[in-house]
Amino acid sequence: MTSIATFFARSSRIARAAAVTLAAVVALVSTPSRAQEIAIGEGIALGWGQFFVADHDKTWQRQGLTPKVSTFASGRLVLDALVGGGVVIGTAAETPVVFATLNGLPVRIIGTLNRHEPFDLVAIKEIKTAKDIKGRRIGYSQGTNAHYYLSKLLRQEGLAWSDVTAVSLNPGDFVSSLAGGAIDGFIWTEPHLSQAIAQGADRFHIIRSEGLYKTFSTIITLQSTIDSTPDLLVKAMKALLEADDNIRKDPDAAATLTAERIKLDPVIAKAFWKRANFKLELDKASLVSLMEEQAKWAVDNKLVRPDARIPDFNTVVVTSVLDRAGRE
């Protein structure tokens, strides 16, 4: 009898243990996988539309991501945060990446959001044409594509850097510096152009030089992130691809929400939208060619350390992440 009782007691314990194990398995299967956190850096400009739409439409979350978004006044500041470990993916034009790689930093481009002519000169009314910036104080942001644009503008007008007083500023200080008289004009994009005109259309105006330069709005990360967490980046790119589709389906809605995000009149945003040519892709050959041109400009003008060598930009532009996101 004792052996039979022991048998049944032992069987009961086994059954209870099996039930507990089964319950744990069921709970594990039925519980959704934990979302992955991703730190995202976003510049304040219309050209980053896909990121703003991804935020608004929660396409990050649909890919199982929990976004932690930080905004920056320029792509160069996003890149600084990327290198410093504050973000793992972000927005920047190609020029800050050129400077970073010339300085040996392993920044990589894994996609482009659009290619367009972003910059205009905002100036006091006494500057009637671009050539009139001779002898004037012109604001720009060193190490950005606005720096490159100003160089091309000067060359086009037959001027040298010594013909102007170039004042490097944080883009957030452009409008106040112009309104306060510290500078006579600045090179940048929206929303700063409209913000400057709002200070007084009788005082300031926009001077456009079309066909001078087209930027790539790029998506950046580090090589170490590509190596260690490629799945995370693929999810992020899939979220941006969905946002890209949403822009094409309803460009007016995308322009409106982007305008709200960067505090810009929606009418101005919609006019700029056509200029931006939004499409998430990666034309590696064209991008590498432009980066090589800018690197040569930076070296020839002694904008980098003397021992800087132009890298192979084919290794800086990485197509594998977007290719995989498009397949899956």
Image (cartoon, helix red, strand yellow):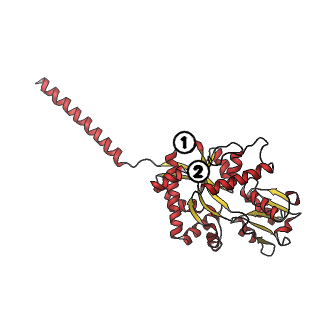
- Callout 2: SS: strand
Does the residue at mark 1 contact the one at mark 2 (Cβ under 8 Å)?
no
**Residue labelled with disc 1:** 227
Q: Amino acid at mark 1?
A: Asp
> In the picture provided, is 122 more to the left or to the right than 48?
right
Q: Residues within 10 Å of mark 1 (few under 14, many from 20)?
A: few
Q: Residue furthest bottom?
A: 202
Tally of marks = 2
- Callout 1: SS: helix
> In the picture provided, is 204 more to the left or to the right than 242?
right
Query: 178 or 248, which is in the foreground?
Result: 248
Image quarter where the N terminus lies is top left
**Residue labelled with disc 2:** 89
Image quarter where the C terminus lies is bottom left
Q: How far apart are labels 1 and 2 at the CA level? A: 14 Å
Who's the residue at 68% across and 63% down the image?
Answer: 214
Who's the residue at 77% across and 68% down the image?
Answer: 122
